[in-house]
Amino acid sequence: MKNNRLTFPKSIAFTKEIERRIPGGAHTYSKGRDQFPRNAPNGIVRGAGARVWDIDDNELVDWSMGLTSVSLGHGHPAVVKRVVEVIQDGVNFQRPARLELEAAETILSVVGGDMVKFAKHGSSVTTAAVKLSRGATGRGRVAVPGDHPFFSFDDWFIGSTAADFGVPKALKSFTLKFRYNDIESLHGLFRQFPDEIACVMLEPVRFDPPANGFLGEVKEICAKNGAVLVFDEMVSGLKIAIPGAGAYFDVEPDLSTWGKGIANGFAATALTGRGDIMRLGGLEPEGARKLFLLSTTHGAESSGLAAMMETLTLFQDGRIVAENWKKGASLRRRLETIIARHKLEPFLKLTGYPCLMLLETGAPPDGDALAFRTLLMQELIAWGVLFQGLFVLTPSHGEQEIEDTIRAFDRACETYRQAVEAGSVDGLLEGSAIKPVFRRHL
């Protein structure tokens, strides 16, 4: 147990330095300075299991796990061993490697589908799913839930957000929004835009479960209207179930996109699905229109595929997911006990599934909700827990990590209670409040 608050002078200096060389100081906006309290660790030096060490030599329990991408633990020995073995024979070749077929057969045996295309980041495969859907249907519009935060950094999606600066106006009307668990809102889009919607893309589940057969009804609507159903399993894959939430809720989409946890943090993502649709991106039949689906020099680079194959092998029998659910349920009960003891039930609430929980934060009347959320993150970090809102359970989160988290959370709740009683974070929050990622102005 840490008896002294951690300090981060070198991390703060590092943040200034890295922003001189990298726009925003990070390669995904969710890792940027405006998404964390001032005292957040930076210049991460290494990770091991469920812990990370920063440039100040602070050791923290990690609950974010690389934006949910590290599904086994940092530096997992079996994954590292497989990667090292493979890359000694080269990582990128002029013709397809034997490993690419092995990787394709491995992932399809786990996640289902007839064919697969690999890439290096999630936006590539979600955008490929959109292009494939447009080719299959001859339509241009895409429907996504407005309450699901992110599908791609490409124009088709970013143009529909508040951060649409740099996206041509003509492109913005092609993405339509409906509400998750509100089937009538999706019906309304198909009535408003008959024979114009190429696909419906959604995360099968985030934190609120699909109600009243929602996913099945979405599939029926797509089938009735000739649209492609795409499940984005970037986050839910290998977490809710094997292979993901689609299987858990027994609804099979036409196409699925996979990433994050399928390679334990290595860069490997995949688009899988029905052969009749996927083959539109192939080389047959001769004379047909060519659909330029995905063409990435590094899409099948050996290290990512090796990490993916080892990770999928370790997850395949379902025992890891079952244990994550069990540990998560115990953690949830203990966190909720602390929330109740500090009388914070109106302000702190755990939602989602035990394997992937969201901590919702609230503020008293006239309080700044984002400032209160920042305060909780600040206090958890100060007591050695790197937290950005999610508890991402992995096999590396053992008894000691959970005990350290419980103690830090108890201390954080003490400070949060002070802020609630004062109606403000004044005098408690060390820097600025975090800001929404998708916003019009800096």
Image (cartoon, rainbow, N blue to C red):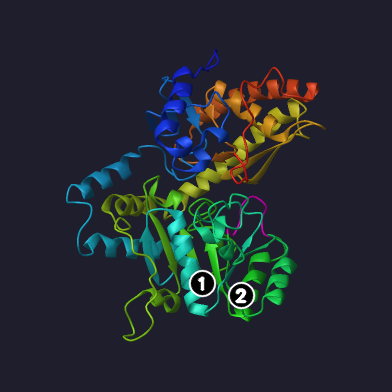
Q: Which amino acid, mark 2?
A: Cys
Percent across and percent down for residue 288 are 37, 84
Verify whether residue 247 appears in magenta: no
Residue at x-position 61% and y-position 77%: 196
Q: Main secondary structure of the magenta part?
A: loop
In space, the residues marked 1 and 2 are separated at their CA atoms by: 10 Å
Marks 1 and 2 in Cβ contact (< 8 Å): yes
Secondary structure under badge 2?
Answer: helix
Asked whether residue 201 is in view, the answer is no
Which residue position is annotated with label 2?
Answer: 222
Q: Which residue is mark 1?
A: 254
Q: What span is colored magenta in the figure? A: 203-210
Q: Position of residue 2 (x, y in %)?
A: 52, 16
Toward the viewer: 14 or 133? 14
The answer to whether residue 394 is seen in the rendering is yes
In-front residue for pair 381/283: 283
Q: Compared to 377, does 266 lie above or below? A: below
Q: Is residue 61 left or right of residue 86?
A: right
* Label 1: element kind: loop
> How many marks are shown on the rendered structure?
2
- Give the residue drawn at x 55%, y 77%: 139
- Give coordinates of residue 269: x percent, y percent: 40, 56
Q: Amino acid at mark 1?
A: Asp
| Quarter that holds the C terminus | top right
97 over 341 or under it: above or below: below
